[in-house]
Amino acid sequence: FRRVLFRSRGSANYDDKRKSHIPLFSDCAISTLLDLDLMVTLVALLLSFFQATPPLQPPEAVKMLNLFKALQSAEEQRHSGAKPALVNFSFTEAEINGYMGYSLKVIPRPGMQSLATKLFAGNYVSTIVLFDFDAVERWKPGTIPLLLRPVLSGQKTIQVDYRFQAKDGKFTFSIEKAYFQTVRLPALLVEEVIKIVAARQPEHFDTSKPMPIPFGVRDVSTGDHTISGHN
């Protein structure tokens, strides 16, 4: 395998003078780590709260469902030739996390135990996923190659931070940093893996180009612990 060296998390600037190293991971290992339908979820985190789910109970889910209905109604107006109603929305970080947690219970993703989001000003989003690789292997034996099971086993955390632009109905992003446990992953490698995995999905996402935001949403932006937008 072509091998890539990652540096461990230490000083804030990760300068090249650090002498301590960690074991090498192959590109194959990283691809397996970030596959399993996980990275698509991370890429689409901003958009994922637009996905409908079965009957919802928590207040944040009810709020989200009402947003779906309002946006759908506006899109129907647009398609009929009428002027669509303007729909503004705003959610707190806590509301997004509450909805995502409930969605994982309603529609479980194999291996994904939890997903937490932190929202910062300037369209900066940090996501931390607790992933159970043993659960994935129980769900579909052989998913994780035997060679990689010593590394990809048990519960592990994966962090991906990205900055996005959502303007005029299009969404783009760039990876700021990513970690597997305490191991920093090269941003370019993560972006390439996301591109490959996204292309495998039924929607055939092409993350190298601006992607359409669903439900006719035009603009989205974040503040400290908030996210807002409109159609």
Image: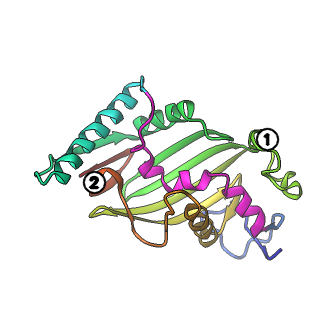
Depth check, front residue: 94 or 211: 211
Indicate left or right for 101 with 27 as reference. left
Task: Identify the mark at residue 9; answer none if there is no mark.
Answer: none
Residues drawn in magenta: 26-54
Determine crowd level at label 1: few under 14, some 14-19, many 20+ residues with C-alpha closer than 10 A: some
Main SS category, magenta section: helix
Indicate left or right for 160 with 156 as reference. left
What is the spatial separation of the Cα atoms under label 1 and label 2, in whole angstroms?
39 Å
Image vertical order of residue 139 relative to residue 142, above or below: above
Tell me the residue that label 2 is attached to. Answer: 216
Q: Which quarter of the picture shows residue 35?
A: bottom right
Depth check, front residue: 32 or 124: 32
Picture residue at 35% right of the left edge, 53% below the top: 214
Depth check, front residue: 69 or 89: 69
Label 1 SS:
helix
Residue type of the residue flagged with mark 2: Gly
Image vertical order of residue 213 relative to residue 132, above or below: below
Residue type of the residue flagged with mark 1: Asp
For this orientation, the residue located farthest to the left is: 82
Horizontal and vertical percent for residue 76? 21, 47
Picture residue at 52% right of the left edge, 34% below the top: 101
Circle nearer the viewer, 1 or 2: 2
Horizontal and vertical percent for residue 171? 38, 63
Does the segment drawn in magenta span residue 60? no
N-terminal label among 1 and 2: 1
Task: Identify the mark at residue 134; answer none if there is no mark.
Answer: 1
Label 2 SS:
helix
Q: Look at the image and name its color scheme.
A: rainbow
